[in-house]
Amino acid sequence: MSAHIWLAEAGLDPQAVESVVHVALAEDGERDVTSEPIFDADAIAGADVVTRRPGVVAGVPVAALVFETLGLTVKPIAADGDRIATGDVLLSVEGPLLGLLRAERTALNFLTHLSGVATVTRQWADAVEGTRARVRDTRKTLPGLRALQKYAVRCGGGVNHRMSLSDAALIKDNHVAAAGSVTAAFKAVRAPGLHVQVECDTLDQVSEALAAGATSILLDNMDIPTMAEAVGLVAGRAELEASGGLTLDGARGVAETGVDYLAVGALTHSVPALDIGLDLNRAAS
């Protein structure tokens, strides 16, 4: 299966991913001044992409596209979303050695970062398992990588919030200040078919949002007792999302208040990479 088909089946836009891959490859310049003088231009080799730490893999088809772009043949071993152990082979590649060496870092950059996102998301999802809550990402993504990062969140068992400002409305404190009140802001934004979420800092704002007709409320920087009170106040009339200052250690306590979602910006804006490497396993010929 080609990487383009694989990406489409994963719900990603192959052309968009290809554009990102080309930009990433271009960052390494036109020549490899280390490898080209040492290896024959027609040398062929093979390698395995191997994980050095346990986690959850994401981005295998993206890495495959990097290798294919530089003329290599890819054999997938692991699938995105798989839990992986130290030493697991994720994919094998074979082809021109110079292409393999040029592709190596770019492919690993995508794979280690996206697998890091999936791994951390899985930790949060596991922490709230058995409650009604789901872990959700935010728009705090790296420029140009939003679609891939949000895909990695899905691979880790999380769910996506809006992809862009045009997908759904989120009324925040600045909007409320400009409009004059939660009610005024909600009435200004509300439109047929548009999902509108209202950020609330206090229980009074929660009551106001409900009275205005809001069916999605973000509880911003509330402590657990206040969140639990908000859940009781809403009584199922709106979905509730906890946001602000959440930690993995405290995730279950937040989930047990009865909220529907935990918004976690750290899934994408500061996640550590998962250690993955490339091992040559078939000598150049």
Image: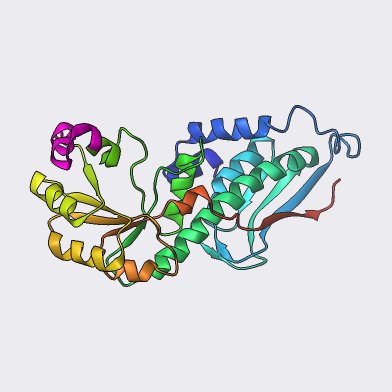
Q: Quadrant of residue 260?
A: bottom left
Q: Is residue 68 above or below residue 222?
A: above
Q: Quadrant of the C terminus?
A: top right
Q: Position of residue 135 (x, y in %)?
A: 37, 58
Q: Is residue 33 above or below residue 265?
A: above
Q: What residue span does the magenta drawing correspond to? A: 177-191
Q: Nearer the viewer, residue 40 or 191?
A: 191
Is residue 231 rendered to the left or right of residue 153? left
SS assignment for the magenta stretch, majority: helix
Q: Nearer the viewer, residue 155 or 142?
A: 142
* Residue at 54% in and 45% down: 1
* Residue at 56% in and 33% down: 20
Q: Position of residue 88 (x, y in %)?
A: 64, 64
* Residue at 88% in and 39% down: 39
Q: Position of residue 97 (x, y in %)?
A: 79, 42
Q: Is residue 19 above or below residue 225?
A: above
Q: Quadrant of residue 68?
A: top right
Q: Is residue 179 above or below residue 2?
A: above
Is residue 40 rendered to the left or right of residue 145? right
